[in-house]
Amino acid sequence: MAIPDYARANFETLLKAAKAGDLALMECTEVASGETRYVMCAVGRGADQDGGDYVMTPFGHLAPGNPYETYIPPA
């Protein structure tokens, strides 16, 4: 199964943010379930790079419990 282009692009952005030290882990509430999730985010600056607000771009949440019980690797 091929990885879609959007997923590759998002992963590349995540890697660049990690290399630059621009990652954050945020506690968020999932809209659909209301559950707390710990979300990996890239951190950027707003339009005014010197003093603008931080922009958090979410990429995904960390799996609760044992991720080996949640995900099946490709065959």
Image (tube, grey):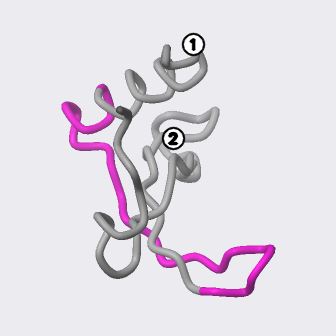
Amino acid type indicated by mark 1: Asp
> Would you say 64 lies left or right of 34 here?
left
Quarter of the picture containing the C terminus is: top left
- Front residue of 50/73: it is 73
Q: Is residue 31 magenta?
A: yes
> Would you say 26 lies left or right of 36 here?
left
Q: Position of residue 42 (x, y in %)?
A: 43, 44
Q: Position of residue 29 (x, y in %)?
A: 65, 80
Residue furthest bottom in the image? 35
> Which residue is pictured at 45% across the width and 52% down the height?
41
Q: Position of residue 68 (x, y in %)?
A: 29, 64
* Disc 1: which residue: 5
For mark 1, give the secondary structure: helix
The mark nearer the N terminus, 1 or 2, is 1
* Disc 2: which residue: 45
Circles 1, 2 touching at the beta carbon (< 8 Å): no
Q: Nearer the viewer, mark 1 or mark 2?
A: 1
Q: Is residue 25 magenta?
A: yes
Q: Residues within 10 Å of mark 2 (few under 14, many from 20)?
A: few
For mark 2, give the secondary structure: strand
Question: In the rendered structure, which segment of residues is drawn in magenta?
Answer: 16-35
Asked if 22 appears above or below 38 in the picture, the reply is above
> Which residue is pictured at 59% across the width and 35% down the height?
48
Q: Residues within 10 Å of mark 1 (few under 14, many from 20)?
A: few
